[in-house]
Image (cartoon, helix red, strand yellow):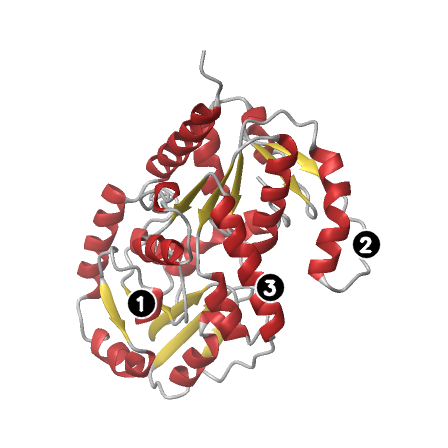
Amino acid sequence: MPSWYLDVFNRSFLLPLTKSISKQLGSQPNSFHIAYLEGKPKQEWKQHFSFHKVDMPYKTIKSKMARFYLSRRKIYSQIKDIDVDAIFTPSEAWAQEFSRYCSKKMDIPYVVWLRGVHRDVRKVLGTSPIKKKMLNYLETRSLKEANLVIPCSMDLAKRVEAWGVERKKITKPVYNGVDTNMFTPMAVERSSEFTIAYAGRISPEKGVLRLMRVAEKLTGVHVLIAGKKQMNISFPSGVEYVGSLPFSEMPRFYNKADLVVIPSFTEGFPNVILEAYACGKPVLVAKEAFPEELKVFGSVCDIDEFESEINRLKKSDLKALGRRARSHVKKHYTWEKFGRSIVKHLRTVVSALLPRV
């Protein structure tokens, strides 16, 4: 699996996600290989994965596209001798393109785990028309040529078929999981005021700016924000920004809130919702960010309704709602189930390409 920056393992659900796959592959760490550009793997991670540091040449070139195409042969030469049966890649233009390239060179299948609508993200970010057209083309090509595409929601399954990927290559959605032993209700120090919390990247497509406009109108509400800054932003009074937290600290963060909010313009299947539910916290989510198949414990509405919904939910029995939310995810959304499904698909793809005796 290509994973360019290992720091994401410290601050996202990618670590339990990949561990769930590794566990199903077998107990040996050489069952799951991770190629990376930057970061340093922790010793604990080496119990589950085999890591391969890759040097990227042409680092001074600003264009990612030019750097990638100039570098791909040299990157490939550093990993070509790794003995693998298939490539598993999270969706992202360059990870997909590199997986496509390696698949052809190694003559092995590659599988894309489709986790979001990246073309919608580029639209929100205001990516230049030429760059957007090129990235959309490359992304779609690599999805069409993949041996299998595994969407994380029903909406993504519909979208990827509309982009021209053969229906037989698209699996049923495989939903993310959550560790309900880690994410659990707990007593923590917190504000005496009603508290709403946002967790995620501080980036335009995540809708943080429109959440700040809502926050400016609220009275008697404490707003907590956690995430890595990827844009210039000033937080109004009444908003507490706690920075980018390690994944291990997120359960305590959620437990400081009464309500977890997601104002994103686009999402796949947000793990923040599952983590909040597991901590016994209801959610308030923008319509375009909530998967249709996920049960609502809280409210899903237009961003223009956030202020009135927060004031309405303040008067609700959120603790009872949170208990039902936790019970729901414990039953339906486990990493074991996720890992089993992914490995089943990987084995099916590899078996289908084996020569018949």
The residue nearer to you, when weighing 107 against 270, is 107
Mark on residue 58? 2
Identity, as a three-letter code, of the amino acid under mark 1:
Leu
Identity, as a three-letter code, of the amino acid under mark 3:
Met
Q: Position of residue 40 (x, y in %)?
A: 68, 43
Mark on residue 228? none
Drawn side of residue 299 relative to residue 113, left or right: left
Identity, as a three-letter code, of the amino acid under mark 2:
Tyr
Mark on residue 259? 1
At a point 33% along the width and 46% down the height, the residue shown is 173
Q: Is residue 243 above or below residue 113?
A: below
At a point 77% along the width and 51% down the height, the residue shown is 70
> Pointer 2: residues within 10 angstroms few (<14), some, or many (20+)?
few
Quadrant in the picture for residue 336? top left
> Pointer 3: residues within 10 angstroms few (<14), some, or many (20+)?
few
Q: Position of residue 106 (x, y in %)?
A: 63, 31
At a point 66% along the width and 27% down the height, the residue shown is 82
At a point 76% along the width and 48% down the height, the residue shown is 71
SS for dot 1: strand
Quadrant in which the N terminus appears: top right
Q: Is residue 177 above or below residue 216?
A: above
User: Closer to the camera: disc 2 or disc 1?
Assistant: 2
For the residues labelled 2 and 3, the Cα–Cα distance comes to: 21 Å
SS for dot 2: loop
For the residues labelled 3 and 1, the Cα–Cα distance comes to: 40 Å
Q: Seen from this angle, which residue lies furthest bottom?
A: 217
